[in-house]
Amino acid sequence: MTLRRILRRHLRLTPLRICLIGSSFMCFFFLGIFTLPNKQQIRRANIEDITDTYKEMLLTAATRRKLAQHSRTARKNLIIVSHGRSGSSLMGDIFNHNPSVFYMYEPLQSAKRITKDKSNTNESYSNIVDKFLTGVFRCKFDQPEILADIEKYYRKPDHPRISQAIASPPLCPYKLTDSRWDPKLCYPMTSASLESACKDNYNLTVIKVLMDRIPESNIKTVLTSCNSFDVDCKILFLVRDPRAVIPSSRSFGFFNEKGNKDALQNTRLFSYKLCKETEENLVFIRKLPDFLRKRIKLQRYEDVAMDPLKELSGLYDFVGLPVLESVRKWLNETTQLSRSDCNEKDGAQATCTKDNARVAANRWRWKVHPHDISVIEYYCASVMRLVGYRTVDRSYELLANVTIPLSTHDYEAKNWGLH
């Protein structure tokens, strides 16, 4: 006998049916009241998963097919994201030397300066950045203030070569290799000339941005500006050992110690902030859907320093560029020189990428005080573990023995299905 027949047999009496139905209704009603989330639960749910914005991008197979179709015709972009003093200038220069790349060196500096000039308006820095990135990813430079700042910045005599595309025809009469080249001879920039140069002469736009210039210091902001079918964005997340980054940031004036310098109060604060931001971005990336994770490459500076040509192949493969012999030759030479080889043609020290990369990767081991290293490891141990940096735990013998690498080949973030 079926369950339905049994129920009918036992519920023939109408009052019994009514009573059962009524009691069921009351149970569900009161259960609903007592299980409704309170305001705190709702607020927690809203911030619990930072990938909620992108869940709608996973919806259907049709969406995936549409993405695949548009990716063939969409404007291609690569965004290099890193903290300052992480080797991002070298990373950007690797793409800057490719003739198919329209490269911009830290363009969010323009947005930062414009925000200061617009301090009496209601437009926020976040809005200016979003508008600017949305335009750049489409080779559009429609904001007059941004355009004026770009021209002023890229035509400075102290860093003329930070964008080979902007310093070359059709924006300038001569190529950088021509002895007649002079930034004073370059043509005035207009929205139309910059857009045409970007769109018609280069297959790929590459920009490098520092984390502290991204609103909320989160890669999510960059992905949001890419959330359209007419642009194809990939992100290169560059990381470096914080024991190298943090002392270098202090020496370059990113922060200073005040009061009792032995207490390293600001070093502690900076270490906590930098490593927290790095870890939060790594967690964000890990929680992205598979097809978005594949558009992000996690790159350690130390891997480039130890084997530049091998990493060059992986970087170019990520964005679909062929490895040119001219780029291989330049990279091989520039990573075997020293800082003393920088000259006025290379621009300021901050933009010159000549350095012995192997030496640079380990320089912190004999330059940074052991106490500073212990402080940094205390605040950064968790994120160091994620990306494969080994702590020395006050072992001066391990620190001094540069034949023992302090970065491991196998680490957790390497297994997250990134490119």
Image (cartoon, grey):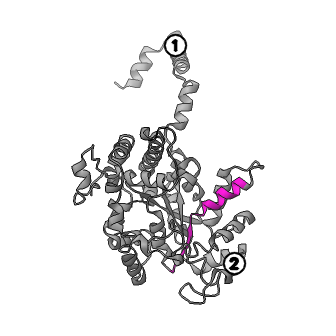
Residue 23: which numbered mark, if any?
A: 1
Residue 218: which numbered mark, if any?
A: none
Residue 366 vertical placement versus 311 (above, below): above
Mark 2–mark 1 distance (CA, rounded to whole Å): 75 Å
Is residue 66 visible to us here?
no
Residue 312 location, quadrant: bottom left
Question: Which residue is located at x 42 percent, y 72 percent?
Answer: 340
Question: Which residue is located at x 34 percent, y 60 percent?
Answer: 363
Residue 193: which numbered mark, if any?
A: 2
Q: Secondary structure at mark 2?
A: helix
Is residue 248 visible to us here?
yes
Pick the front one: 138 or 146: 146
Question: Which quarter of the rendered picture does the C terminus lie within?
Answer: bottom left
Q: Residue furthest bottom?
A: 179
Percent x, y for residue 362?
A: 32, 60
Mark 2 vs 1, N-terminal side: 1
Residue 111 vertical placement versus 52 (above, below): below
Pick the front one: 266 or 94: 266
Q: Are marks 2 and 1 in contact (CB under 8 Å)?
A: no
Q: Does residue 113 belong to the magenta stretch? A: yes
| Number of on-image labels | 2
Q: Does residue 355 belong to the magenta stretch? A: no
Q: Which residues are magenta?
A: 99-116
* Front tag of 2 and 1: 2
Residue 248 vertical placement versus 149 (above, below): above
Residue 310 location, quadrant: bottom left
Q: Is residue 336 left or right of residue 199?
A: left
Percent x, y for residue 43?
A: 56, 31
* Mark 1 neighbour density, 10 Å: few (under 14) some (14–19) many (20 or more): few
The amino acid at mark 1 is Ser
